[in-house]
Amino acid sequence: MSQSRTERVGASRVLGLDAARGLAVVAMVIAHGLPFVSGRISESAAFVLQQVNDLASPLFALVMGVAAGLVFRRSDAARGDARAVVKGLALILLGTLLEQLDHWVAVILHILGLLLILGTPLLRLAARWLLGLAAALFVAGPWVIRAATRAAGGVAGGQPPDAPWATNPLVQWVVLNPHYRVLTLLPVFLVGAVLARRGLRDERTAWWCALVGLGMVWASFAAELLGHPVRFSGDLPDQVQENGLALAAYGIVMVTGLARVGQRPLYAVLRQLALLGRVALSLYVGHVLLLVPLIAPFPEGGWAAMVILLSLSLGTAWGWARLIGQGPVEWALERIAPPRHAGAVLPA
């Protein structure tokens, strides 16, 4: 299928998916620049930026699930599994290498890689089973984290575990990582796969995502006011808030993309986010690499460091996407992965 025909068939679909991915990676870049200015912003600004920080990882997992659902075919499941394993292992390698550098980022790429490997085979299941499994994991996840932490000699949200087996990378990435873990990202990944099956031109589904997501966010705030705050990363109030943010953002982006509002401001912003979304992995790697030499000259932080990080990383990524197209990390992953099934249109 030629590029022009692809654009005629699904331009708004590609735009919405790329824009949601772009929003996720921009949120990550902003979150990773916050330590530069954390002591220089008001409480209200800190609250807003905390929501940006909380949005990033679940939205990335949701978009990854949508993309996986778009290209996965149960009739050719072995090919889908093979692609997921190769790309997942590459992300794991890249993430573990980035972790060795001197910065403050809690790198997520290796956890996303494992999520892709473990989540893709589940796409053989029917949509109702995927949703049921997502709901079960959503409810059971906090209990599993709490039980595993206790078994390892720690307390969730308090004393870290000290058992030798708790330091195993797989145990960390699946359950005990204090920032991200497959256990709590897998439900939103599976929901994304179901959304892909619904079709990305379904405006009603996009509206439901936005409304349900906003409802979850408000419920999390209400729970905190009623004495049920977030006690540890991955507990139920935390998951309600973060997954709600991801669903709301995804729904709003998709509704805006489907509206086709021409040159109006929201649609114009969406088009720029879509450019960043096409190079999201490259932008992620690039901004972490940029942080390494940027931290030392600004030991006290400051807005100058924040501006340099945002302008160089986002500006370079935007220019690359606009002038060249596919990002270098995305290009490399596509070259090493097994070929897609015939007829795939949208990027994974």
Image (cartoon, helix red, strand yellow):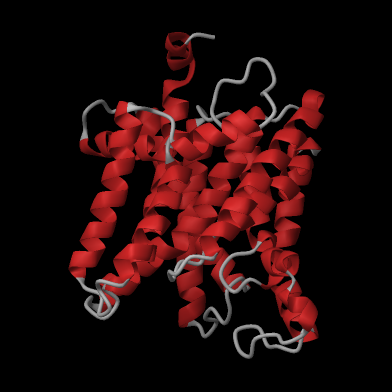
Give residue 111's position: percent from left, percent from top: 63, 57
Give residue 181's position: percent from left, percent from top: 64, 64
Q: Residue at x 68, y 73 (%)?
A: 176
Give residue 1's position: percent from left, percent from top: 54, 9
Towards the viewer: 209 or 337: 337
In the picture, measured across the screen, residue 297 lies left or right of residue 142, that is left
Q: On screen, 310 above or below 332? A: below
In the picture, measured across the screen, residue 132 lies left or right of residue 217, that is right
- Whether residue 176 is visible here, answered yes or no, is yes
In the picture, measured across the screen, residue 138 lies left or right of residue 74, that is left
Towards the viewer: 261 or 190: 190
Towards the viewer: 240 or 292: 292
Q: Residue at x 23, y 77 (%)?
A: 42
Q: Residue at x 75, y 77 (%)?
A: 166
Q: Residue at x 25, y 80 (%)?
A: 300
Q: Quadrant of the C terminus?
A: top right
- Whether residue 272 is visible here, answered yes or no, is no
Q: On screen, 264 above or below 235? A: above
